[in-house]
Image: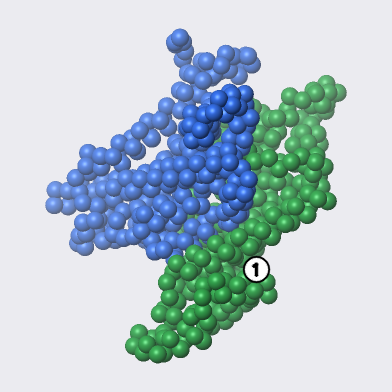
Amino acid sequence: MSYIIGRLFQAILSILGISTIVFFILQLSGDPVLLMVPQNASAEAIELMRHQLGLDRPVFVQYLDFMKNLLLFDLGQSFVQNQPVIDILIQRLPHTLKLAAAALFLAIIVGIPIGMLTAYYRGKWVEKLLMPIILVGQSSPAFWTGILLIMFVSVKLRLLPSSGSEGLQSLILPAITLASLTIATFARMTRSSIIDHLDQEYVKTGKSKGASSFRLLSRHIFRNASIPIITMIGLETANLLGGAVITETIFAWPGLGQLTIQAIDARDFPLVQGIVLFGSAAYIFINLLTDLVYAWVDPRVKLGKDVAS
Amino acid sequence: MTIEVNPTENQASSTVIPNISKVKMRKARWFKLLPFIVILVLFVIIALFPGLFTNQDPNLTNLTNRLQPPGYEADGVKHWLGTDSLGRDVWSRLVHGARISLYVAVSAVLLSGIMGGLLGVAAGYFGGGIGSFIMRLADIVLSIPFFLLAVLTVAVLGPNLTNLIIVLSMTRWPLYARVAYGNTLGTVNKDFVQAAIALGAKSTRIIKRHIIPEVIPSLIIIATLEVGLMIINEAALSFIGLGIQPPNPSWGSMLTEGQKFITNGWWLATFPGIFIFLIVLSVNMLGDYVRDVLDPKN
């Protein structure tokens, strides 16, 4: 129990810390009023607006105000779209969730089997065939994979659309692009986790009793090796939610990632701030959840101390 | 000791005989690494001496020669990899882009490594309030999705080379800090350090002479693996317009342009992509190797 409370406390501390960092980074951006008023505005008009927005108060007071609003889930108003930031985020979120879910699904059904096979058939042709896939996936940045897919699948073969968010067809290419790195990560982690278990006594016992390779892998080894894999899936889910900026930009996918770039181009700082806070909170929440699941699956975690290494 | 072995023969024997000697294993891997080392050395030479590989100005525009395919020749100048939408030579832009890519990646890794390493050692050695403050800060920075933090900071500070390097290092130092912290805690309690303290050595001397040498190998392992990531991140930030600003050549911004002309200029996106892929692959392979050699756990 104390582990869970400690972990919760740490998550709350992280969110407060991030809010503080984000607030002060935005303070560096200069005077937002100058961006909002027309170019020929008089000095009095600028002063009035600054006063109306409360920007003439001391930074510390503004900071407390900002933190108070956060507690009420008030992320402020978008400069450009004249809507509460939180509403804009909620409109875009379903698209990002859909893309992340599709990529995660792909990564699990492709990455984990590749990891299992390359571990089990170490040194055989299966490994030699599959290892390059891991290496290529690991070294291909999303912007490159995405452009290649558009080049071959959309432009050359004309099989799938290169942009948009209509139906399942337009989901396929972005999902593959977003998943490519995650597939490699899953495969690597599964592989090393399974290799750790291959030499253990229970595997030898199973083998000597005549269990088939498939049964050994799926029933015995994978169950024991799955704990680090669960952690990894959690971590990667958090990454997929926050890391879709590039993929969404390439495929014009109307999620939070594309919104980030649009907000930056328009210098709409409240919106940028909202996205970063939202993304970070989601990231921290999923990590927290993973740690709790982890502690529940493996009771040893609760007893061990959190060692930095 | 030198053992002359045919690499393919060695590879085969390593699968048949499980207890092959460590020396042979290393040698076999070293041979496999050779192509990647060659790529990296070439990359470094290209980045340091771009003039050896091209004599054309990467920013020279020529609108009459725009979007010409690879091998195009005009006015006695051969454009091996074609020209872009402003008629600039793609090969010379790639060559000059290598310098920026290497410069950003190496500076960011060095800066984050030194900063994170020193903060981690300080946190581990002095402990107490300062120590836990540093480590909590590291936890917080690590829990912000890295790319969002970088995007936010560059957007606010304005995109230029220096800001890019600062942002990339600010987001990655906690990685080094954690490892340095763990190693320092492990080293401080060892007998030789305790003996030095008992003999009255100053803290600065103990840190310099005893702790830092123990910490550095693990930091080098992370640093080699981070170089590839930094190259990708620089390209990614430039790709979305927050990195190197035009007209200066960067592989990331060349890819952005390539995407615009994907139907009528395949070479624009293809070549920068291949460059990034090859470099990152080589750095990753070398990083894995360095980790396996230096890390006793593997």
Residue A121 seen by the camera? yes
Q: Position of residue B44 (x, y in %)?
A: 33, 37
**In which image quadrant can residue A70 be found?**
bottom right
Residue closest to the eye, B192 or B89: B192
Residue closest to the eye, A217 or A30: A30
Q: Residue at x 36, y 58 (%)?
A: B160
Which quadrant of the figure contains the C terminus of chain A?
Answer: top right
Q: Residues within 10 Å of mark 1 (few under 14, many from 20)?
A: some
Q: Is residue B204 left or right of residue A237?
A: left
Residue under label 1, please give it: A94
Q: Is residue B207 left or right of residue B161?
A: right
Three-letter residue code for mark 1: Pro
Q: Which chain is blue?
A: B
The local secondary structure at tag 1 comes to helix
Q: Position of residue A73 (x, y in %)?
A: 66, 73
Question: Which shade is chain A?
Answer: green
Q: Residue at x 21, y 51 (%)?
A: B57
Q: Is residue B218 left or right of residue B92?
A: right
Height in image: A305 above or below B29? below
Height in image: A94 above or below B110? below
Height in image: B137 above or below A190? below
Name, please, the residue furthest toward the front. Answer: B200
Q: Residue at x 29, y 56 (%)?
A: B248
Q: Position of residue A87 (x, y in %)?
A: 62, 77
Q: Residue at x 70, y 33 (%)?
A: A194
Residue closest to the eye, A304 or A136: A304
Please state the chain letter of the residue tagged with numbered disc 1 in the rendered image: A
Residue A136 seen by the camera? no
Name, please, the residue furthest toward the right. Answer: A209
